[in-house]
Image: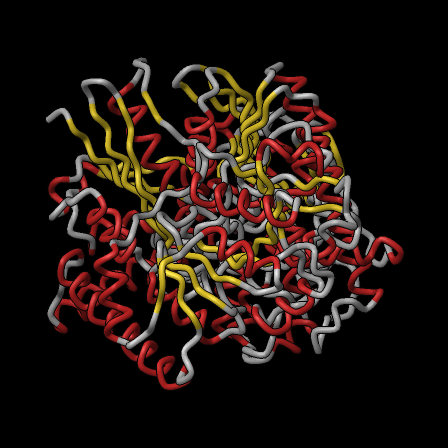
């Protein structure tokens, strides 16, 4: 067939699940697409659920009736988990789950690197023939936090990558563990940061800069026994920050201490991104830069990178966090499996990747719940906006990513100095320090903001040239997260801002996401109605309908909530039957037993077996154990019978073991260096396995470096502690040896 459908999914064991389908016409290589996040459809933020609703949404968009019509499915793959601590059920991969449960031909499933999916999501839509590609996030596949790619024509080549602790991990830790702003609260930290400029230096953030290596390991506190303690004592809460600190309680974020910390981590982020921008430019020497990964949502850092690194053009994918992975995955499949070296056509001039809702759907909804409306006219709306009225707006396809770009937006007059506080408190029910964005006509932006380029996706922050004109859309430091709006990008939204411009002489509207606190962005007309009625929004626009607030709002809210919950639940029941294999209870119990047994073997017994096999295979060879004192002592103590009369050396690395025990390790000869012509090196560490490999690699070949762990393993130390200890205090007091 000339038409190919490629499905990309972000799925199990990850937040921001969702789906995308790319439609490729193999005759002219033209690409059409649809993308949606699962949270929009099930009304729960950051769901860790298989995206059956998103898959169905995308299939309905292209009128695909069953999975057999999809030619290829692409997912990302976390080959190695950063902590590898969440137990057997988590360590069984998404890929295995898909094969076992999803009604899709496993021969048509491909998995690619997490960062490669990010790279595809930003490079292919950029339409750059050649570009440097910078990916920065908390964690990708194989522990990657930063990766450099080079895009040339259709090919994306990895140049260099950095693993372990980077700015993404540090920023998230500060956000959740100090500022207490929750999952996905990094944007809140960015908004809080300017308030803390006068109070900087509240927390010491140590990091090293060496090319792509932006090392925050001195700042982040490693905890090898984190999961053990969680299992022994459920009240134990790990603290991934080395610095002692207070925890923000009672939402007092504007306290100088906490605002100062927000400023400190934001300042570090900006320095890191500028450094990485300059470094990748030096190494790849491109005029263009494509940017993605969760850290790319930091619009302040993006602007500083762009100004400092002197790229002529920079493209930041609007859904640059993990929410955008499905599109990158599907695009990669289309380009690399079907287009190859051929040119392909993709028009990505806006971020509106969802579907339109018909007038019939909208009319039926309004009639069902007896809600009155009139025809929506731009001049009337603009006039009401200029009088201080607040509008919720749903128009055409929904935006992809976390930023509302006009089609799922709350709009207001930016000239009203009280508007920001009012919307934060009465409408959005969120923190007072959160800023709003100005949506400005593209042909007027350079008159109002210090921007060198357009910013259609709110991913660049710029100084306002006229802050007194739009006080509610300007942050405390005089900056704004700007959205430039063109006729090509969004004709209807452009015309509305134009109408406001004619009345007020100001070509800007205050724009914020159409949702209440803790909720995802609205997707459907039903979602829009509910959010409108539950907040203090004055008017609602749904396509060409202007809706006034009804008098009996409370009664309608209950009916709408019941109706929506029923729709979602019924749809889920149907989709589970449609997409997922069903097992009898007996089959389920058998499968669970077999999977648990396999998981226990992989996680607990296999590392010990591998260690014993290595000792047997190399019994006449010169062996060196390299690792940490705690792990090595535990390993030796649990394998005494295999070590009698063996001549084995041990080299201890000075990593920060949690217990820092200095007990003498039996059966081993301590040495001071590793360069003594050993036949094999056995890595005696779970937590620091990858760092040890890097240290040993210059001295020995890969074939000589042996590890007893893989991505499904658990530390031998952990295993025995969990089995034999019932009180975490005993671990601290007596050390691990009394527990083995």
Colour convention: secondary structure
Which residue occupies the foreground of this view, 498 or 400?
Answer: 498
- State the quadrant of the C terminus: bottom right
Residue 221, percent across and down? 69, 56
Using the rendered image of the protein, determine whether residue 202 is visible from the camera's viewpoint. yes
Residue 150 horizontal side relative to residue 169, left or right: left
Could you tell me which residue is drawn at 82 percent across and 57 percent down?
196
225 lies above or below 504: below
Residue 48: image x %, image y %? 39, 60
Residue lying furthest right in this view?
198
Quadrant housing residue 313? top right
Q: Which residue occupies 73% across, 58% down?
A: 192
Instruction: Answer with the quarter of the image where residue 32 lies.
Output: top left
Residue at (36% x, 63% y) in the render? 374
Whether 42 is drawn above or below 215: the answer is below
Q: State whether residue 647 appears in this view.
A: no
Quick one: 613 or 261, which is closer to the camera?
A: 261
Q: Is residue 605 left or right of residue 368?
A: right
The quadrant of the image that shows the N terminus is top left
Left or right: 476, with 233 as reference point: right
Q: Write the residue at 44% across / 32% down.
A: 488
Of the pair 570 and 658, the residue shown nearer to us? 570
- The location of residue 241, given as percent across then percent down, is 71, 59
Disc tally is 0
Residue 351 x %, y % = 44, 40
């Amino acid at each position: 067939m000339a038409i190919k459908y490629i499905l990309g999914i972000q799925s199990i064991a990850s937040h921001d699940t969702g789906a995308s389908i790319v439609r490729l016409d193999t005759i002219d290589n033209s690409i059409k697409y649809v993308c949606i996040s699962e949270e929009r459809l099930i009304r729960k933020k950051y769901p860790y659920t298989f995206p059956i609703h998103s898959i169905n949404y995308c299939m309905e968009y292209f009128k695909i009736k069953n999975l057999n019509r999809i030619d290829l499915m692409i997912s990302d793959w976390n080959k190695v988990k950063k902590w590898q601590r969440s137990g057997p059920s988590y360590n069984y991969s998404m890929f295995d789950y898909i094969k076992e449960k999803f009604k899709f031909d496993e021969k048509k499933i491909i998995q690619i690197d997490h960062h490669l999916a990010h790279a595809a999501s930003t490079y292919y839509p950029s339409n750059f023939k050649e570009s440097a590609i910078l990916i920065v996030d908390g964690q990708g596949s194989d522990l990657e936090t930063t990766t450099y790619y080079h895009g040339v024509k259709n090919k994306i080549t990895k140049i260099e990558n950095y693993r372990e602790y980077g700015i993404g991990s540090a920023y998230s830790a500060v956000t959740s563990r100090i500022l207490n702003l929750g999952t996905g609260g990094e944007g809140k930290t960015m908004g809080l940061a300017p308030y803390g400029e006068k109070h900087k230096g509240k927390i010491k953030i140590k990091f090293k800069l060496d090319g792509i290596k932006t090392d925050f390991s001195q700042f982040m506190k490693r905890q090898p026994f984190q999961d053990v303690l969680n299992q022994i004592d459920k009240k134990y809460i790990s603290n991934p920050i080395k610095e002692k600190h207070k925890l923000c309680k009672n939402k007092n974020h504007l306290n100088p201490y906490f605002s100062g910390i927000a400023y400190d981590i934001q300042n570090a982020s900006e320095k890191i991104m500028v450094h990485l921008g300059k470094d990748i430019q030096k190494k790849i020497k491109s005029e263009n830069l494509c940017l993605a990964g969760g850290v790319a949502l930091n619009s302040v850092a993006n602007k500083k990178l762009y100004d400092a690194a002197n790229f002529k053009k920079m493209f930041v994918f609007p859904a640059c966090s993990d929410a955008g992975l499905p599109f990158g995955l599907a695009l990669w499949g289309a380009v690399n499996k079907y287009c190859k070296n051929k040119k392909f056509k993709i028009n990505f001039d806006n971020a509106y990747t969802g579907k339109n809702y018909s007038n019939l759907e909208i009319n039926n909804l309004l009639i069902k719940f007896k809600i009155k409306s009139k025809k929506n006219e731009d001049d009337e709306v603009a006039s009401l906006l200029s009088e201080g009225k607040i509008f919720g707006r749903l128009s055409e396809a929904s935006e992809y990513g976390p930023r509302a770009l006009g089609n799922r937006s709350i709009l207001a007059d930016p000239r009203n100095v009280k508007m920001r506080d009012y919307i934060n408190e009465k409408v959005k029910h969120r923190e007072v320090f959160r800023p709003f964005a100005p949506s400005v006509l593209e042909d007027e932006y350079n008159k109002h903001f210090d921007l060198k380029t357009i910013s259609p996706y709110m991913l660049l922050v710029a100084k306002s040239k006229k802050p007194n004109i739009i006080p509610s859309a300007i942050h405390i430091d005089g900056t704004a997260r700007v959205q430039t709006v063109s006729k090509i990008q969004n004709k209807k939204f452009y015309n509305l801002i134009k109408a406001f411009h004619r009345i007020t002489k100001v070509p800007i509207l205050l724009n914020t996401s159409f949702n209440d606190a803790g909720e995802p962005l609205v997707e459907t007309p039903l979602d829009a109605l509910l959010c409108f009625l539950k907040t203090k929004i004055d008017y609602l626009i749904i396509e060409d309908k202007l809706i006034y607030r009804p008098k009996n709002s409370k009664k309608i809210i209950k009916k709408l909530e019941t109706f929506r919950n029923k729709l979602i639940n019924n749809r889920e029941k149907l989709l589970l039957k449609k997409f997922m294999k069903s097992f009898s209870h007996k089959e389920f119990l058998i499968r669970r037993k077999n999977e648990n047994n396999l998981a226990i073997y992989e996680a607990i017994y296999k590392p010990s077996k591998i260690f014993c096999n290595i000792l047997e295979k190399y019994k006449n060879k010169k062996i060196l154990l390299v690792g940490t004192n705690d792990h090595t002592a535990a390993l030796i103590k649990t394998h005494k019978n295999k070590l009698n009369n063996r001549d084995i050396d041990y080299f201890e690395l000075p990593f920060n073991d949690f217990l820092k025990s200095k007990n003498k390790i039996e059966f081993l000869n301590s040495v001071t260096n590793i360069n003594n012509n050993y036949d094999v090196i056995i890595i005696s560490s779970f937590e620091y396995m990858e760092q040890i490999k890097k240290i040993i690699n210059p001295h020995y070949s890969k074939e000589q470096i042996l590890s007893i762990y893989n991505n499904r393993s658990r530390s031998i130390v952990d295993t025995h502690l969990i089995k034999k200890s019932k009180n975490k205090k005993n671990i601290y007091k007596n050390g691990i040896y009394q527990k083995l």
